[in-house]
């Protein structure tokens, strides 16, 4: 039986780990609504308008978050169903301090080995939401702490490699490039690498506003993939807001 996520788990986790953003939004609305007392009638509509804009942006981001993480089939990993995975296959799952997917993959591929790695480094990866997530959720049993520059795995070991909402936490381009070269090294020549991310695009900007700048653009990801000698087989969309890049080692590269 595949693992089922509790209702609203995705939405509640996002709020729990990013509560400071919502607190700031509430604080700004309170300040704006109070400020109208000190404004002349000509200017009173401005704080009301700004408060409305902040409220709509915050509510829409929460609705989109629920739609993506709880309502859609994101965590069913349907893109994996399109590729035959043999019994006893080697699967690598990599996270950045918060692992929502290893248990799901183990339930999906019961006869396969799921090798779990966590590259979170509190000195390099300083996102406060990850620190809160680590405190709330223990690492997956058997998870191995690794460095982005050196995965403790043999060459050509894995048929499947999954990196879900983790690679964007590597903020330095050179470090990301080295990381993806490591992924290429440990993936079999006929293996597949699945990278799932939000993109810095118009859809995520509408949903998350300036928060979307924490993500990388499609062209930025393509630059990393190509410079790491990885070939893009296809890009799968789960809703308008999430892309899964399906990659394979470029056999023409040396």
Image (tube, helix red, strand yellow):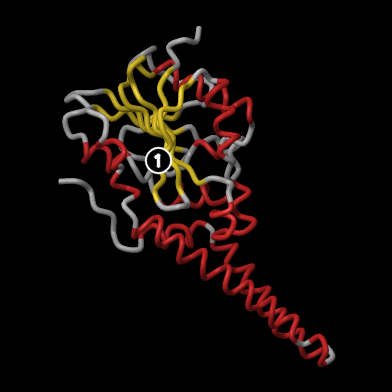
Pointer 1: residues within 10 angstroms few (<14), some, or many (20+)?
Answer: some
- Give x and y (percent) for residue 117: 40, 30
Q: Residue furthest front?
A: 234
Residue 86 lies left or right of residue 210; in this view the side is left
- Give x and y (percent) for residue 230: 48, 21
Please, what secondary structure does the residue beneath circle 1 have?
strand
- Give x and y (percent) for residue 5: 28, 54
Q: Residue at x 41, y 62 (%)?
A: 66
* Above or below 225: residue 99: below
Query: Depth check: 241 or 58 in front?
Result: 241
Q: Residue at x 57, y 60 (%)?
A: 206
Q: Residue at x 44, y 15 (%)?
A: 185
Query: Depth check: 151 or 136 in front?
Result: 151
Say which residue label 1 marks: 236
Q: Residue furthest top?
A: 254
State which quadrant residue 125 falls in.
top right
Q: Residue at x 21, y 28 (%)?
A: 112
State which quadrant residue 178 falls in.
top right
- Give x and y (percent) for residue 194: 39, 33
């Amino acid at each position: 039986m595949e693992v089922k996520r509790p209702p609203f788990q995705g939405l509640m986790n996002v709020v729990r780990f990013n509560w400071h953003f919502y607190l700031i939004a509430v604080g700004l609305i309170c300040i704006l609504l109070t400020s109208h007392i000190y404004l002349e009638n000509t200017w009173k509509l401005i704080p009301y308008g700004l408060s409305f804009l902040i409220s709509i942006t915050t509510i829409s981001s929460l609705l989109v978050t629920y739609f993506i993480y709880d309502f859609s089939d994101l965590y069913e990993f349907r893109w994996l169903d399109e590729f035959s995975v043999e019994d006893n296959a080697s699967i690598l799952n990599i996270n950045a301090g918060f692992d929502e997917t290893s248990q799901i993959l183990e339930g999906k591929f019961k006869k396969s080995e799921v090798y779990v790695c966590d590259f979170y480094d509190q000195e390099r990866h300083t996102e406060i939401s990850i620190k809160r997530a680590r405190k709330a959720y223990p690492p997956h049993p058997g998870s191995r702490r690794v460095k982005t520059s050196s995965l403790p795995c043999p060459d050509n070991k894995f048929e499947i490699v999954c990196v879900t909402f983790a690679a964007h936490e590597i903020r330095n381009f050179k470090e990301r490039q080295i990381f993806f070269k490591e992924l290429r090294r440990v993936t079999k020549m006929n293996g597949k690498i699945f990278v799932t991310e939000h993109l810095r695009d118009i859809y995520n900007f509408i949903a998350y506003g300036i928060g979307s700048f924490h993500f990388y653009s499609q062209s930025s990801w393509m630059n990393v993939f190509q410079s790491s000698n990885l070939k893009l087989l296809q890009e799968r969309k789960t809703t308008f807001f999430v892309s899964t890049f399906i990659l394979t080692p470029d056999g023409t590269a040396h």
